[in-house]
């Protein structure tokens, strides 16, 4: 079983990369949110791997963080009708904090905007994952269980996002951005500027 790959990134795309390890090139499917974090081709890179072996295909799915990998596995293993490709599409469209918030708050509208997800599948995501997501957040924060995630900040904190990231997303929403668009814009800004960028700097970059 392949747990991770650590090698040279020889090819890089939005949903597919190739990593060379000891002379062997491994094709790995990745969500856009992972591809955004990767260096340029030719650099050393490490990806956490979820292998999916079927009779007609052997596919590797890669992620930079454990949060991304664990959420992918949760989608595939716990939600009926959601396979690896649909799970990859969900993670490509929304970041982990936004997915957690949408699931806990029952935001079917936001979830249904993901590619390959209709209203019924979005409803299944909420029903089948709400307890799992709530338990994950509770365990990470060491708090009693709660049913509502009242702020984007809480979800961002449990997924390793910075306070500046959360504040910048909230500011864009206040300016009239839709939450998924704000999330995407600040992700791109943070990818360019780094995790230490302040809220003000992230906003300036996102609004360019």
Image (cartoon, rainbow, N blue to C red):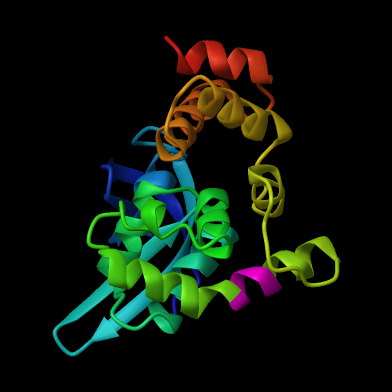
Query: Considering only vertical position in the picture, is 199 above or below 26?
Result: above
Whether residue 200 is visible here, answered yes or no, is: yes
Report the number of numbered marks: 0
Q: Start and end of the magenta stretch?
A: 131-135
The percent coordinates of residue 117 (x first, y second) are: 27, 63
Residue at left 50%, top 30%? 191
- Give coordinates of residue 150: x percent, y percent: 69, 51
Q: Position of residue 159 (x, y in %)?
A: 64, 52
Q: Residue 125: which quarter of the image?
A: bottom left
Taking the image as drawn, is residue 60 in sight?
A: no
Seen in the picture, residue 115 relative to 36 is either above or below; the reply is below
Is the residue 109 above or below the residue 192 in the image? below
- Tell me if residue 19 is in the magenta stretch: no
What is the x, y in percent for residue 153? 69, 43
Determine the residue positioned at 58% across, 63% down. Answer: 104
Q: Quadrant of residue 136?
A: bottom right
| 44 and 157: which is toward the camera | 157
Residue under the point 66% across and 20% down? 199
Write down the quadrant of residue 2 in the picture: bottom left
Q: Residue at 37% of width from left, 75% of height from top?
A: 51
């Amino acid at each position: 079983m392949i747990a991770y790959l650590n090698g040279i990134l020889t090819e890089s795309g939005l949903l597919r990369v190739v990593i060379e390890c000891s002379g062997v090139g491994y094709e790995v499917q990745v969500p856009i949110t992972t591809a955004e974090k990767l260096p340029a081709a030719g650099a050393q890179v490490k990806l956490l791997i979820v292998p999916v072996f079927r009779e007609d295909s052997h596919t590797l799915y890669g992620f930079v963080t454990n949060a991304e990998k664990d959420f992918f596995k949760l989608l595939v293993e716990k939600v009926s009708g959601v396979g690896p490709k649909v799970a990859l599409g969900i993670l490509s469209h929304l970041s982990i904090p936004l997915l957690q918030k949408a699931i806990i708050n029952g935001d079917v509208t936001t979830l249904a905007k993901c590619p390959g997800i209709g209203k019924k599948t979005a409803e299944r995501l909420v029903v089948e994952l709400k307890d799992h997501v709530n338990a994950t957040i509770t365990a990470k924060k060491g708090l009693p269980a709660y049913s509502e995630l009242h702020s984007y900040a809480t979800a961002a904190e449990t997924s390793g996002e910075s306070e500046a990231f959360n504040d910048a997303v909230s500011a864009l929403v206040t300016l009239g951005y839709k939450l998924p668009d704000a999330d995407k814009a600040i992700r791109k800004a943070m990818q360019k500027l780094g995790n230490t960028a302040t809220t003000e700097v992230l906003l300036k970059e996102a609004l360019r």
